[in-house]
Image (tube, rainbow, N blue to C red):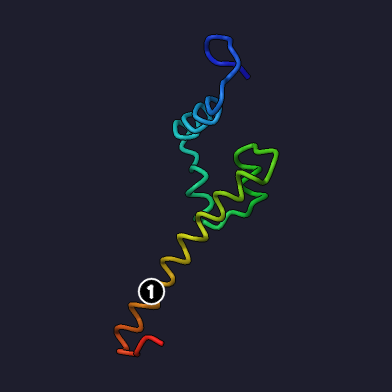
């Protein structure tokens, strides 16, 4: 693929262009898809990635965020029950 000027995309250029086209089309971004628990294979299919490397980055970030929320919920529940922290 080439830019609107007929030149090859450089560096992150294609990713940025693709992100913009997804936003214009109302297609959710990879972060939202990963947070919705899309699998690595599903992310690859949605975004046309050939390697699972990029999909795994998004999945790991989404899992880390979910675990943080889960841990916060546990602490809040513990506080409400006035259970001492081990």
Judged from the image, the secondary structure of the residue bearing numbered disc 1 is helix
Q: How many marks?
A: 1
Query: Quadrant location of the N terminus?
Result: top right
> Which residue is identified by label 1?
73
What is the quadrant of residue 46 in the picture? top right
Residue 69, position as x, y percentages in the image: 41, 66
Image position, residue 57 (x, y; %): 57, 49
User: Residue at horizontal 54%, vertical 31%?
Assistant: 15
The residue drawn where x is 51% and y is 54% is: 61
86 or 70, which lies in front? 86
Residue at 45% x, 31% y: name it: 24
The residue shown at (58%, 12%) is 7
Q: Is residue 4 above or below residue 25?
A: above
Residue 49: x and y, percent?
A: 65, 38
- Residue 3: x and y in percent read 55, 16
Image vertical order of residue 83 relative to residue 77, above or below: below
Are there few (<14), some (14-19), or many (20+) residues within 10 Å of tag 1?
A: few
* Residue with the most extreme right position: 50
Q: In this rendering, would 3 be left or right of 78? A: right
Can you say whether 54 is above or below 68 in the image? above
Q: Is residue 84 above or below residue 57?
A: below
Left or right of 75 on screen, residue 16: right
Instruction: Pick the quarter of the image with the C terminus.
Output: bottom left
Farthest front residue?
Answer: 86
């Amino acid at each position: 693929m080439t830019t609107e000027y007929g030149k090859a995309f450089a560096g992150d250029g294609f990713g940025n262009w693709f992100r913009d086209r997804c936003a214009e089309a109302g297609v959710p971004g990879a972060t939202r898809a990963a947070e919705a628990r899309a699998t690595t294979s599903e992310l690859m299919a949605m975004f046309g990635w050939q390697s699972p490397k990029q999909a795994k980055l998004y999945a790991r970030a989404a899992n880390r965020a979910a675990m943080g929320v889960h841990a916060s919920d546990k602490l809040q529940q513990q506080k409400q029950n006035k259970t001492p922290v081990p």
